[in-house]
Amino acid sequence: MAQYKISYRLGVRSSQGMGLSENTGDDFPRPYDKVMPITIFDPDGQPHNILLDRAELKPYKMDTRDGPKGSGQTKLWQDKCNVNGASGTEIAPELWRRADRGSRQRFFIECKRAFAFTSPISPDVIGALGYDKNGYPDDLEFQNDIYVDGRPDTVIASAKEISLPEHAIHFEHKVNEANTVMQVLTSNKANVILTGVQYDYVVRDRSEAPGLVLMASDNHQEDLANLLKWIGWYNDVLVDRTTLAEITTTATEVDGPQDIEGYGFQFNDAQNFGNVATGESTVMFWYQGTIAVTIGGVAQTLINYGDTIDSWQMAYFNISTDSGDLVFTPTGLAKAFDIRITNGQVI
């Protein structure tokens, strides 16, 4: 069966490779559309199929078998050979396996090893010209490619230049994240019989890795965990706890909300907590009394959040463009506790 770009061969015996296979290759003779080959008979009554090649306008004999003894008719394993059977193009066959998977589609499989089993095309070619002592064509090589999850355009793993008699192909940990695996075996010559293939897999039932879809609350938690500044006491010294850099202060140490010992501080004069760089962030803290807050001399509007706890009020404000020194100025005696500046606005 043939058309210009599509041609199939039907094997009816095991020695022919049973079933349909597509004839491929740039030098495979192809007729004009709807033009069939013709069959002629030689003086010995032997049939020969003749095809007019569309590309070269030359007739080619398409025999696929050896003739009877003495007929001189021999099967050729190249495309577009000369009349003397020489100077043809090697046929490079491909075997596409159906996709392998575990007993459930969700299972992940890992290809550990691949085996290809071959035999000579005929015992008569053993040691003949162009064949080795085992009956295989000289310079015969194989290649095994692996495709996964229904994507036949992307090779995931490949074993190249495989020569006989080494049949074992190892793919240790090359393919371990696939639900389906498809194997493709190719060779550079056609005159060899492939008697079988074997693929060894390890199958695992495991959940896929969680996605990276984060809700707003997840982002806020990440921002709270990656602070730009965190003002508090450390060994009786007021420091930025993200760097342990000491902060010069006249404040004294006091207990915080719910009697959290030693983490709050009280002051009756302005306290400079160092530079705050430009960028979106949130400043949050607990306080008692009256406090005015500035960044780079620009007054910030405090927003009280929630109810008071033991007379402590939580407050915050967001920063967009202001930068400079963060300064707390009390009216009279005031207290502050747990000053945090986040990397990103969280409220």
Image: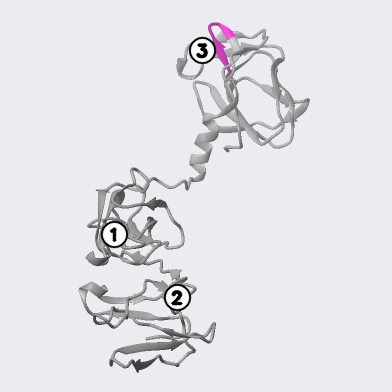
The three-letter code of the residue at mark 2 reads Cys
Residue type pointed to by label 1: Gly
User: Nearest the camera: 84 or 163?
Assistant: 84
Tell me the SS state at disc 2: loop
Residue hosting label 1: 127
**Quadrant where the N terminus lies?**
bottom left
Residue 62 is situated, as x and y percent measured from the top left of the image, at 38, 82
From where the camera sits, is residue 324 visible?
yes
Residue 97 % position (x, y): 31, 64
Say the numbered circle drawn on residue 81: 2
Q: Tell me the kind of residue under disc 3.
A: Asp
Instruction: Using a 10 Å C-alpha cutoff, classify the residue at mark 2 as few (fewer than 14 neighbours), some (14 to 19) or many (20 or more).
Output: some
Q: Nearer the viewer, mark 3 or mark 1?
A: 1
Badge 3 is on which residue? 255
Quarter of the image for residue 273 reads: top right
Which range is magenta? 231-237
**Residue 262 forms part of the magenta stretch:** no
How many residues crowd mark 1 within 10 Å: few (<14), some (14–19), many (20+)? Answer: some
Horizontally, residue 231 falls left or right of residue 179, namely: right
Neighbourhood count class around disc 3 (C-alpha, 10 Å): few under 14, some 14–19, many 20 upward? some
- Identify the residue at image location x=36%, y=88%: 49
Whether the residues at callouts 3 and 1 have beta carbons within 8 Å, the answer is no
Above or below: residue 165 compared with residue 136: above
Question: In this picture, is 100 found above or below 224?
Answer: below
